[in-house]
Each structure stands twice: as structure tokens, then as C-alpha cells.
Image (tube, rainbow, N blue to C red):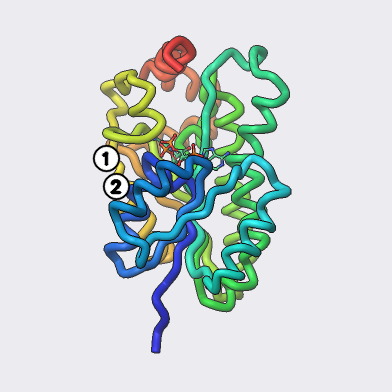
């Protein structure tokens, strides 16, 4: 008999993590949600019910806590089929104004934690024929002024997923990276209270959740979630970076990011 699939979703206390968790539960999975805010995780569990949603509080920026988190999950008797590395944070500022702590905090949360959770869970995910889904960003495809550390971590997530996918080719474990653009209604962009550049637009959070399910069921390498056709522009930007700078500037991206220094 097939067991109920279990998904570990990081960043399940708000934003996209909630929408992704709800989608996975609708598809019949049990979700183990991870974040720091116990009150929000508890509130979500009260809404959903304990049967399908359990939570673990953990500060993912602290690598020493990650083996303890996985030990706790295992000692509670859970096997993991899907790891959704969704937790993330950004910080809009002139690069020079970031402290060393800011740099480490963003790198640890956005890049080191997904790597470490994957490292700890890979034997089990491989055994279960499971899937790792990394939520990156279009900010990892083209650098974003005033959000450069975030951009660097998302580029790292994309390239690490790319290498790992090839490395795991002959195994039962699969990896997908998802690159959303600006997301409406909930999450870090929406909470910033700034309008997206009209030429880029926004996508609904449900499109990211659908991409997660498509990743798992169709074993996609990479999924871009954006309202417009961005792929040709990204390709041109790879060939001609300064032309890429002009295009993002024409779209109003650096201007928007600069506005978010004030509003963040
Ligand atoms: N929203 C967008 O427009 C957009 C676009 C592209 C990519 N993305 C990516 O999508 C993912 C989800 O973003 P979102 O918009 O849902 O962001 P969000 O609303 O700010 O939520 C971030 C989630 O990550 C958790 N988190 C942050 N730091 C953590 C830490 N140190 N330890 C544990 N959990 C931590 C937060 O929980 P606690 O604060 O409770 O710990 C929260 O649940 C991120 O990786 C983001 O980069 C978002």
C-alpha cells in the first residue's frame, strides 16, 4: 500500500509557504511546516487541523540547529518524500550598508539551509523516490541592485540545483528549481507595498504552488513563474550583461528596489 506522502515545507508560517502547504494538502500530502514564528504556525494548524499539518519551530539561519530539527522529525516517526526549500528573506539597501551579520543571515537562510537540509535528508528522499523543490527567484537570473545578497543567494540556489540534478540523474531523487518573478496578494513583494513595474507585472501565489506540484509530478528541471515572456530577455542578458542592465532599468527594476530601501 502506498504511504501518505510527507512534505517538509520551510517558511510555512506566512506568504507563499502557506499557499504551497495548502496545495500539497489538497493533493493528499501531509505537511510538516518549519519557521520561527510559533504563533503563526499554530494559527495555521488550528485552521487546517493536526492530522494534515504539523509544525516545527527552527531558525534556519543557524546551521547547528538543522541536524537537531531533522532528528526531531525522525524521532516523531516521519519519513520525508518532498523537501520544499521555500523559506527566504531579502534586505533592500545599498550593499555597503549591510553588516556582516546581514550578509551571513541572508546566505545562511536562503542558501546554506536548503543545502544542509538536503544533505541531511537525501538518503531518505532517494529511498522514497522523492523530490527536492528549491524556491529561488528571477533575482537569481539577473542581479538586482539594492538587493544584491538576496540575488547572489538565489543565483547560488539555481546553480546548485542545476548541478545536483545532474548528479542525482541515476538515482531515485529529483530536484527542481522554481524562479518566481513578482508575486501578488501575499509574500515579501506584496508586503513591501510597492507596485510592480507595469511591463513585468505580477503572478498570483497559486501559480507558484502549481509550479511546485508540476515540479514533483512532471520532474521539471526549472520552472519560471512570471506573467510575461521573460526567457528571451534573460538569454540576451546572459550574452550581453550591460544590455541586460539597460533592459531591467527600462523596466524600472532598480528604481523599484531603491524605493524599497525606504519602505522596508
Ligand atoms: N513573494 C515574492 O514576490 C517572491 C518572488 C520570488 C521569490 N520568492 C521566494 O519565495 C519564498 C517565499 O517567499 P515569501 O514571499 O512567502 O516570503 P515571506 O512572506 O517573507 O515569508 C518568508 C517565510 O520564510 C520564513 N523564514 C524567514 N527567515 C527564516 C529563518 N531564519 N528561519 C526559519 N524560517 C524563516 C518566514 O517565517 P518566520 O518569519 O516565521 O521564521 C516565512 O514563513 C522565498 O524563498 C522568496 O525568496 C518570493
Residue 123: percent from left, percent from top: 64, 72
Q: Are marks 2 and 1 in contact (CB under 8 Å)?
A: yes
Q: In the visual, does 128 lie left or right of 2? A: right
The residue closer to the viewer here, 125 or 228, is: 125
Res. 207 mark: 2
Q: Residue at x 53, y 34 (%)?
A: 238
Residue 244: percent from left, percent from top: 48, 24
Q: Residues within 10 Å of mark 2 (few under 14, many from 20)?
A: some
Q: Residue furthest bottom?
A: 1
Q: Secondary structure at mark 2?
A: helix
Res. 108 mark: none
Q: CA distance from mark 2 to mark 1?
A: 6 Å
Q: In the visual, does 18 lie left or right of 131? A: left
Q: Secondary structure at mark 1?
A: loop
Q: Quadrant of residue 263?
A: top left
Residue 106: percent from left, percent from top: 61, 33
The residue closer to the viewer here, 77 or 87, is: 77
In the image, residue 138 above or below residue 244? below
Res. 204 mark: 1
Q: Residue at x 62, y 65 (%)?
A: 121
Amino acid at each position: 500500500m502506498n504511504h501518505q506522502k510527507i512534505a517538509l515545507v520551510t517558511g510555512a508560517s506566512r506568504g507563499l509557504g502557506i499557499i504551497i502547504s495548502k496545495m500539497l494538502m489538497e493533493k493528499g500530502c501531509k505537511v510538516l511546516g518549519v519557521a520561527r514564528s510559533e504563533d503563526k504556525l499554530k494559527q495555521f494548524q488550528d485552521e487546517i487541523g493536526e492530522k494534515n499539518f504539523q509544525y516545527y519551530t527552527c531558525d534556519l539561519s543557524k546551521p547547528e540547529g538543522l541536524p537537531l530539527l531533522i532528528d526531531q522529525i525522525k524521532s516523531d516517526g516521519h519519513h520525508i518524500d518532498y523537501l520544499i526549500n521555500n523559506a527566504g528573506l531579502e534586505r533592500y539597501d545599498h550593499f555597503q550598508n549591510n553588516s556582516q551579520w546581514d550578509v551571513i543571515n541572508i546566505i545562511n537562510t536562503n542558501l546554506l539551509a536548503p543545502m544542509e537540509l538536503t544533505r541531511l535528508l537525501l538518503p531518505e528522499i532517494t529511498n522514497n523516490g522523492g523530490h527536492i523543490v528549491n524556491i529561488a527567484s528571477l533575482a537569481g537570473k539577473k542581479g538586482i541592485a539594492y538587493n544584491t545578497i538576496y540575488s547572489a543567494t538565489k543565483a547560488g540556489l539555481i546553480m546548485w540545483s542545476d548541478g545536483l540534478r545532474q548528479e542525482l540523474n541515476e538515482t531515485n531523487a529529483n530536484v527542481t528549481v522554481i524562479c518566481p518573478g513578482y508575486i501578488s496578494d501575499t509574500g515579501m513583494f506584496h508586503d513591501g507595498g510597492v507596485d510592480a513595474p507595469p511591463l513585468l507585472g505580477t503572478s498570483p501565489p497559486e501559480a507558484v504552488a502549481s509550479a511546485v506540484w508540476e515540479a514533483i509530478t512532471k520532474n521539471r528541471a526549472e520552472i519560471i513563474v512570471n506573467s510575461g515572456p521573460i526567457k528571451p530577455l534573460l538569454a540576451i542578458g546572459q550574452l550581453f550583461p550591460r544590455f541586460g542592465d539597460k533592459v531591467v532599468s527600462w523596466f524600472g527594476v532598480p528604481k523599484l528596489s531603491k524605493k524599497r530601501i525606504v519602505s522596508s
